[in-house]
Image (cartoon, coloured by chain):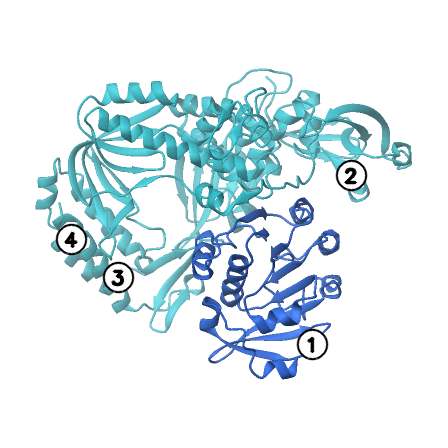
């Protein structure tokens, strides 16, 4: 089951099939999706990148932290033309796609493949999705969440949501690396 | 006697050949353009499409497919078609295919099947400025068939093929000019001729291309002759992996870190073209990996039923390289570059005939082969001092028997060299430096990782003089006695009162000098230097070398 491990965030996106997380802060998003993969296992992952993009050892460490050693299934798509067919090949399993618009082309085919998959999908994009990437993809996503690094931590900015207003959820950087309690604090009155 | 074909260009209704001795010839022909379409008759409406024929080809997956071969009169029609149709078989290029069916081979005589290297004049003309090679200059260095001369005025050069830089190209009379500043490959004009010869591609189509194009063209010829359709892009889906599969497969070559120090009487044993040889031996190609279970490994399986496209393309290149090594080093070097790229290209995303699983198989088998070789060495009483990817340094006797046994067990060819001594160095953190060593082979110094391209000229010169001193030593104890303090003092003085060229640092083809206000582009003229920067640089290098010698 796809989950971020941040209970208040999971509450906001619980009914959304396609959720897109984006950030121009490479390190922040990278750590975040490794955490999400580890905590969501068993899960299917598509990595879109020429090289790198996924550190199996970091996922292993997160799996130790969350005590979740279920399987992570991975396929890599190295060029833009590989992306739609790789997504299609993953079947109707819960899916995490890392940087689907990495090559900045073939948007329509990629979004079409994402829409075809019946299960939940989490997308992670290393770009400012309010300015670039697929517009069709932005319409397709039920939620779009921006990750921004702040002075003492980072915040989730709900840029698009069916259930929530545009709010900012601040968090400590250390929370990324550990379990977060499900006491939502004042947020439960806002959402 | 017939002239050699140096280059070829398409013209309307035929091909224009540029021949040696400044001759030209036009041959009337049409160009073949292959396309997959449901309605070939519509294409015939283009006035320059003469006719078409239906042909049976196979896809990369082995399925039969219908392809139409359109004969067109000019490249305009070809470009028009490729925008509107699914044009396939564009590698080898349409021009290369046209020449091939006309029986015309680049750098061969017209209507002749002799196999010798063409007797053509090859020139290289480079302008020199105060900092070295430059786009403009008052002095010109001219090299014609290995003879080097300097001209202090505009040179007049005539040659069949000329490699020229910047304005030097204006003073050259040649049928084929290769502009050095546009080149993307590391080989000389002679190397490019060799590439043109083996890939049956006109020189201008590969002169400014990367190694990958030559390699892919060679592989594509194999596919073309087997009547396999070559698409523009081959989308691929990777095998589904678990996390631990990725951890096991996504690795490079094996490295055994050396114990720093100096060792007398050692042997360096290298696998000759290890990665390409493994590709050929184990039949590794996109269509053979995971196709059937003839060879099963922990990672993937390999199918041996049909020879793969890549092994077939590489097999004769490996043979050609070892034959050329005895005849012409420059041409052998050109082939070596293709073989070096062949492995990396297997895993490259745009490779037409490779895939990531095939790439992983090669590194897996290379690690296994080197590990087994190290085991054999130890079984035979040899001490393995260092090993890195495809080579190892051993100490002990029975080297011939060791090589014989390894060649027998692995099926790969080995070369070996005896060094009087070898020094393994450390990094600044005092850890072994696996890619840096200095060795003496009967007075010839082999230094890897010591002199870097981006060092100031004066530091490079200092290190070369140090190595010259080391070349006179025979044993490690002789090395220990070498004193470089005087040499350092001499260079320190030269750093203060040096020539401007001493301070030049080449970084990615651009000459820089470190001035008082930081680095500046030397092409703008000499504007002074920061003496302290160069003295400190020299001091650091001196300390480093002194440390290396003291550890012997």
Q: Is residue B302 left or right of residue B364?
A: right
Residue annotated with mark 3:
B537
Residue B467 visible in the current orientation? yes
Q: CA distance from mark 3 to mark 4?
A: 14 Å
Q: Which dot, 3 or 4, sits closer to the camera?
A: 4
- Where residue B129 sits: x, y (%)? 41, 55
- Where residue A187 sits: x, y (%)? 60, 81
Q: 10 Å neighbourhood of mark 3: few (<14), some, or many (≥20)?
A: some
Residue annotated with mark 4:
B546
Q: 10 Å neighbourhood of mark 2: few (<14), some, or many (≥20)?
A: few
Which hue is chain B drawn in?
cyan
Placement of B263 over or under B492, stated as above or below: above
Residue annotated with mark 1:
A164
Letter of the chain that mark 4 sits on in the rendering: B
Residue B21 visible in the current orientation? no
Q: 10 Å neighbourhood of mark 1: few (<14), some, or many (≥20)?
A: some
């Amino acid at each position: 089951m796809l989950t971020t491990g941040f209970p208040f965030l999971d509450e906001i996106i619980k009914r959304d099939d396609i959720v897109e997380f984006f950030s121009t802060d490479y390190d922040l998003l990278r750590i975040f999706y490794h955490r999400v993969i580890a905590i969501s296992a068993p899960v299917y992952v598509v990595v879109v990148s020429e090289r790198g993009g996924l550190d199996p050892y970091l996922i292993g460490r997160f799996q130790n932290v969350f005590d979740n050693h279920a399987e992570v299934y991975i396929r890599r798509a190295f060029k833009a033309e590989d992306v739609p067919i790789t997504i299609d090949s993953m079947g109707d399993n819960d899916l995490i796609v890392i940087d689907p618009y990495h090559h900045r082309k073939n948007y329509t085919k990629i979004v079409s493949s994402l829409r075809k998959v019946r299960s939940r999908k989490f997308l992670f994009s290393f770009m400012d999705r309010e300015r670039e990437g697929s517009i069709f993809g932005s319409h397709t996503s039920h939620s779009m969440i921006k990750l921004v690094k702040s002075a003492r931590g980072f915040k989730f900015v709900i840029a698009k949501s069916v259930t929530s207003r545009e709010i900012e959820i601040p968090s400590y950087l250390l929370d990324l690396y550990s379990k977060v309690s499900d006491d939502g604090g004042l947020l439960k009155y806002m959402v | 006697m017939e002239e050699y074909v140096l280059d070829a260009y398409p013209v309307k209704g035929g091909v224009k050949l540029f021949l040696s001795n400044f001759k030209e010839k036009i041959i009337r022909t049409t160009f073949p353009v292959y396309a997959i379409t449901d309605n070939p008759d519509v294409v015939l409406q283009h006035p320059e499409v003469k006719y078409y024929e239906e042909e049976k080809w196979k896809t990369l997956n082995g399925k039969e497919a219908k392809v139409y071969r359109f004969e067109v009169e000019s490249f305009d029609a070809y470009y028009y078609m490729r925008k509107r149709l699914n044009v396939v078989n564009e590698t080898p290029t349409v021009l290369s295919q046209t020449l091939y069916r006309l029986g015309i081979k680049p750098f061969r005589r017209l209507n002749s099947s002799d196999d010798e290297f063409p007797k053509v004049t090859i020139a290289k003309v480079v302008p020199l400025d105060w900092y070295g090679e430059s786009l403009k200059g008052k002095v010109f260095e001219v090299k014609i068939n290995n003879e080097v001369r300097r001209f202090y005025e505009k040179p007049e050069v005539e040659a069949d093929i000329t490699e020229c830089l910047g304005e030097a190209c204006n003073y050259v009379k040649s049928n084929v000019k290769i502009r050095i500043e546009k080149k993307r490959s590391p080989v000389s004009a002679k190397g490019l001729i060799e590439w043109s010869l083996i890939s049956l591609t006109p020189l201008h189509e590969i002169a400014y291309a990367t190694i990958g194009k030559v390699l892919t063209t060679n592989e594509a010829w194999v596919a073309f002759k087997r009547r396999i359709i070559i698409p523009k892009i081959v989308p691929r889906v990777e095998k589904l992996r678990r996390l631990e599969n990725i951890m096991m497969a996504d690795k490079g070559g094996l490295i055994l870190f050396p114990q720093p120090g100096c060792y007398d009487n050692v042997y360096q044993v290298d696998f000759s073209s290890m990665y390409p040889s493994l590709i050929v031996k184990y039949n590794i190609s996109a269509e053979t990996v995971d196709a059937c279970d003839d060879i099963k490994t922990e990672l993937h399986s390999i199918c041996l039923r049909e020879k793969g496209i890549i092994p077939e393309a590489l097999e004769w290149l490996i043979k050609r390289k070892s034959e050329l090594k005895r005849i012409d080093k420059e041409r052998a070097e050109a082939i070596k570059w293709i073989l070096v790229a062949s492995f990396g290209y297997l895993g490259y995303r745009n490779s037409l005939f490779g895939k990531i699983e095939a790439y992983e198989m090669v590194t897996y088998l290379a690690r296994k082969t080197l590990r087994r070789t190290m085991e054999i060495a130890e079984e035979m009483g040899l001490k393995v001092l260092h090993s890195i990817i495809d080579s190892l340094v051993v100490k002990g006797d029975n080297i011939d028997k060791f090589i014989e046994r390894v060649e027998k067990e692995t099926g790969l060819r080995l070369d070996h060299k005896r060094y009087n001594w070898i020094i393994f160095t450390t990094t600044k953190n005092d850890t072994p430096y696996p890619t840096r060593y200095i060795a003496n082979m009967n007075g010839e110094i082999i230094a890897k990782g010591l002199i870097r391209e981006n060092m100031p000229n004066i530091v490079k010169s200092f290190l070369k003089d140090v190595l010259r001193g080391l070349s006179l030593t025979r044993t490690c104890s002789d090395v220990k006695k070498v004193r470089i303090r005087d040499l350092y003092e001499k260079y320190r003085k030269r750093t203060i009162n040096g020539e401007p060229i001493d301070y030049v640092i080449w970084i990615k083809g651009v000459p820089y000098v470190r001035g008082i206000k930081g680095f500046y582009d030397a092409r703008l003229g000499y504007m002074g230097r920061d003496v302290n920067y160069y003295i400190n640089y020299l001091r650091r290098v001196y300390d480093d070398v002194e440390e290396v010698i003291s550890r012997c």
